[in-house]
Amino acid sequence: MSTIADVAARAGVSKATASRALSGRGYVSDETRRKVADAAAELAYVAHPSATSLATGRTRTVGVIMPPVDRWFFSELLAGIQEALFALDYELALYGIREGTATRERLFEAVLPQRRFDGIIAVGIQPSARELERLHRSERPLVSIGPYSEGSSAVSIDDAAAARIATEHLIELGHTDIAFIGGSGDTGELRFGDARRVDGYLEALRAAHPPGTPRIADASPTMPGGYDAAVELLGDRRNRPTAIVGVCDEAAIGATIAARRLGIAVPTELSIVGIDDHQHASMFSLTTIRQSPHEQGHEAVRLLRQRIEHPDAPIERVVAASALVVRNSTAPPRAV
């Protein structure tokens, strides 16, 4: 079996030059690259991954830390990350572990310090856990996905703006009694991005003429969570809001199902807006704020590759585009 030394000897270059020519990392003239490639082809040389790792100091592996992928956003995001890494011939080591668990603590305390990665993508890290700071101490290239990105290159949407745009859409239709499902009376209990969405909702109400009165229903950002909160919110016929903003599409879809089971017509009696453009949003004809987690995954890999190739480059933050998608779940309030 031919070795990199054999290829270098055949091409008349050093082993280091041959390695750079075949790996594409580091400068090699076009003529030398052709000579090395021809020598490798003549010798039927195939680089072994472990040998390449030793020669370059790279593992061709990226660690991805994220919550469990049982929600649409995270599964779509992971698909985008994996697709982009595969195109670059990188492998993915996934750690999809719920926050606040002993397993998660062991990951940061004992597992990650021992693993060799060319870089790390951290998804949805919360500021209270101080996990980004711990990742920074490992001195590996790092990119975060989500609203909290202290000290790292990052991809996110403007969560506050997304909820503000959703709420403004309802205000422009003439709604004055607008509830928010998926928030909490104590924003310290919310995920950072969800808390930012509550902020956007409140900002839109304060800017309305006249200002609106907040109605925030505590709920998990899931279809069952949105359903349960909407059943309670809509149960009193005399005190129902005329519109709802869901913290995400899943909560908004849960509210839509609750309204239908209560005999409340959407949108003639109740308008509903979500955030995300979930794969089921069009099926429910849900007006929403679109974001693309798949594209965010691609963008995170692009940023990470830059950090790997140019460690001293400035930090880059990318705010992914989000746009209002109007479907049939919103309409002006019914005249009384």
Image: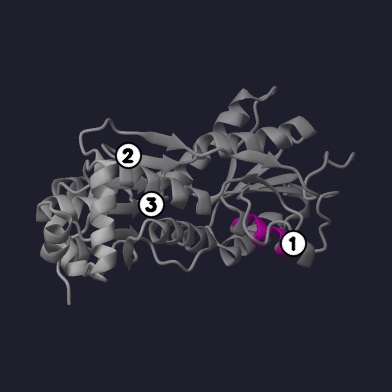
* 292 to 199, vertically: above or below: below
Return the residue at label 1.
283
SS under mark 1: loop
Residue 51 image label: none
Quarter of the image where one finds residue 162: top right
Quarter of the image where one finds residue 109: bottom left
Query: For the point 33% across and 64% down, which residue is it?
Result: 92
Q: Which residues are magenta?
A: 251-257
| Contact check, label 1 and label 2, Cβ < 8 Å | no
Q: State the separation of the CA atoms marked 3 and 1.
A: 27 Å
Q: Amino acid at mark 1?
A: Met
Return the residue at label 2.
153
SS under mark 2: strand
Quadrant of the drawing holding the C terminus = top right
Residue 276 seen in render: yes
Relative image position of residue 285 (x, y in whole percent): 77, 55
Q: Residues within 10 Å of mark 3 (few under 14, many from 20)?
A: some
* Residue 85 forms part of the magenta stretch: no
Relative image position of residue 120 (x, y in whole percent): 27, 53
Q: Nearer the viewer, mark 1 or mark 2?
A: 2
Residue 124 image label: 3
Q: Is residue 306 left or right of residue 226?
A: left
Query: For the point 19% across and 49% down, which residue is it?
Result: 140
Q: Is tag 1's residue or tag 2's residue first in the polypeptide sequence? A: 2
